[in-house]
Amino acid sequence: MNEIKCPHCGKVFQVDESGFADIVKQVRDSEFQRELAEREKLMQADKEQALALAQSQAQGKLQESLAKKDASMQQGLAQRDAVIAELKAQIDALANEKELYAQNAVAKIERERDTLKAQADQMRASLEAQLAQQKDAAALAQAQLASTLKGDAAAKDQRIAELETQLNSQKAAFIAEKELAVAQAKTEIEKERDALKAQIERERDTFNAQLNHERDTFKTKIEHEREASKAQIALKEAEKNQRENELKAQMAEKIRAKDEMIAYKEQEIERYRDMKARLSTKMLGETLEQHCEIEFNRLRATAFQHAYFEKDNDASSGSKGDYIFRETDNEGNELVSIMFEMKNEQDDSTHRHKNEDFFKKLDADRRKKNCEYAVLVSLLEPDSELYNTGIVDVSYRYEKMYVIRPQFFIPLISILRNTSQSALEYKAELALVKKQNIDITNFENEMEDFKQKFGRNYRLASEKFKKAIDEIDKTIDHLLKTKEALLGSENNLRLANDKAEALTIKKLTRNNPTMKAKFEELHSDPALKAAEDSEE
């Protein structure tokens, strides 16, 4: 027991352990709530303080940026004024330089024109004088040439006769020397011809001997290669015969094994027919079911570790199938489910059933038991070429339904299981692709929304920036106008100052004899002059 004293009346109460724990819990809960409320107030105050601080910092940064912007604007205006002044000075200098250059060029061209004109006149006069001198000299030379030709004609005739005589004698001597040289050259050529002919004969004999040797060598080589080819062909022929004999032996072995298999199958068929003749209709069906169950249990441990294959004993819906097959993956996801129906009958049965007679019931049982596939394992219609060929797809009548013979029981399960595995992988990939497409669509939508918002903000910023630029241009224009007005006032003040500095007593007293006399009187008074000198 615990004692609690009332703080108001001073009365003492005795409380058991559970009551005391409840009271302590209430006190602790109230204190916790109070402390929590105080902490929330403190956090709210800190939040408001931080918000105010952030606002003040943002405002300070904004003012700082505006100040920097104003300073940069003032600096830009100053730079712009300086550039404008510099450009004006350059334009004025270029205009002066251009005018001076044009004046100099005109003067230079005029001087060159005058010089060329004078030179042309001088050259024309000189050429005319030279032409007259050349005409006189030509006439004199022609007269001298005529007299000289008449005196030299006889000397030239004599000289020609002497030269003809000398030429004839030299010609005879040259002919003799030429004939001697021709004879000597002919002799030397004949000697060289004979030597060359002998050399050609020797080279021809050597070439013929070498050619005969090479021909014999090549002939021997051809003979050796021919013999080798014959030996190789014989070897290949022997290998071919050996291969043919081996193939014939293998074919004979395969034929023998096939004959043995056919004989064994015929024996099995005969034995099966005898067994069917000894069994009833119900026993025949049960034997087929047992056969399928035994075939499945033989491979259950190795190939179907996660499979369920049991008889369908649930007849609550009014009908039931023979067997249900279900298989799951490692995660417990169902891969494939099959409803099996086994049908057989005696050979001497009076009423022959067809496979189609059981399609409707098999489809109904498959749907009631939520199976994906329906398979009829049948020995009915033994003479039908359709059902004896293998696995028969009857999906044209009922969805995902097959008719097989007992030997295709395990292969069909494997085919459907592998198909379902591939389909499950495809479904997983399709789900992943759909998820990726959804993610891409969401990303594109978010990106489009961001682009729209960014474009809007950019447009607003661009409009504000353009407006600011326009205001700056207006301010610049206003400042330029103010500058022009100040420059105009400066010019007026300069003119006024010039006029004030040009103002003299002489100009003031012009056409004013009274004032002129007063100033002369003032300058002639010695006392006033002395006072002016003292003031100075």
Image (spheres, rainbow, N blue to C red):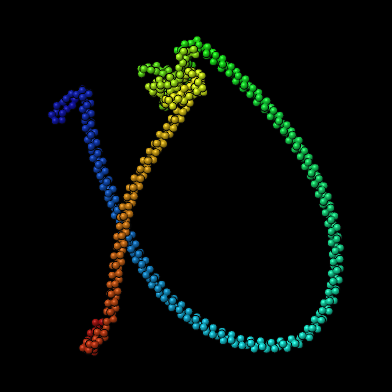
Instruction: Say if 526 sits above or below 485 in the image.
Output: below
- Can residue 336 be seen here? no
| Residue 515 in the image, given as x and y percentages of width and height | 22, 87
| Residue 29 in the image, given as x and y percentages of width and height | 23, 31
Nearer the observer, 306 or 42: 306
| Residue 375 in the image, given as x and y percentages of width and height | 45, 22
Nearer the observer, 505 or 212: 212
Residue at image coords 85%, 74%: 172
Residue at image coords 55%, 14%: 270
Instruction: Say if 37 sits above or below 483 in the image.
Output: above
Query: Horizontal placement of 18 versus 365: left or right?
Result: left
Count of numbered labels shown in the rendering: 0
Residue at image coords 81%, 45%: 212
- Can residue 483 be seen here? yes
List the single residue furthest toward the left: 9
Residue at image coords 27%, 49%: 55
List the single residue furthest toward the top: 278
In what quadrant of the picture does the N terminus appear? top left
Q: Quadrant of residue 131?
A: bottom right
| Residue 19 in the image, given as x and y percentages of width and height | 21, 24
Instruction: Say if 525 sits above or below 360 in the image.
Output: below
In what quadrant of the picture does the C terminus appear? bottom left
Q: Quadrant of residue 340?
A: top left
